[in-house]
């Protein structure tokens, strides 16, 4: 549980199962090649009253040839309004598969962070 950068999925391969992860801004971020299965992702906006929405992921894939990225399988989202993620690198890769997105996910879904071609 945290606010910003809660879980630094730095590098390497990781498998997270049935975890509870909460935060507000880029609370799952990094360069790892990871699977999150059956996790509960909670957007906590209350400690930052000026924030109207948060951002769950900031994946930082830097090169097209890199094999890293985040896969969320069968996860649930709750809490305040949030984007699923934003591009922390020019080739960011995040997949949400069979997840319960609830109404906490903003319809825009993804922020390309002004990176051309990642809209």
Image (tube, grey):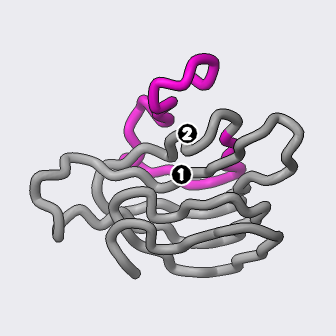
Residue in front for this viewpoint, 30 or 16: 30
Residue at image coords 71%, 42%? 62
Residue at image coords 43%, 29%? 108
Q: Is residue 45 above or below residue 1?
A: above
The magenta segment is 92-119
Circle 2 is placed at which residue position?
A: 87
- Residue 52, how many percent across, how many down? 19, 47
Residue at image coords 50%, 41%? 86
Residue in front for this viewpoint, 109 or 85: 85
Q: Residue furthest front?
A: 62
Q: Which dot marks residue 26? A: none
- Residue 4, how many percent across, how many down? 36, 66
Q: Which dot marks residue 58? A: 1
Rendering quarter of residue 39: bottom right
**Is residue 87 one of those drawn in magenta?**
no
- Residue 75, how many percent across, how many down? 61, 63
- Mark 2, secondary structure of its residue: strand
């Amino acid at each position: 549980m945290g606010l910003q950068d809660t879980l630094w999925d730095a590098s390497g391969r990781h498998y997270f199962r049935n975890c509870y992860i909460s935060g507000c801004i880029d609370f799952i971020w990094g360069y790892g090649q990871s699977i999150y299965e059956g996790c509960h992702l909670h957007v906590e906006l209350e400690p930052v009253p000026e924030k109207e929405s948060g951002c769950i992921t900031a994946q930082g894939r830097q090169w097209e040839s890199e094999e890293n990225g985040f896969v969320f399988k069968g996860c649930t989202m709750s809490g305040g309004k949030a984007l699923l993620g934003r591009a922390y690198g020019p080739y960011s890769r995040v997949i949400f598969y069979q997840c319960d997105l609830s109404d906490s996910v903003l319809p825009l879904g993804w922020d390309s962070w002004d990176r051309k071609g990642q809209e």
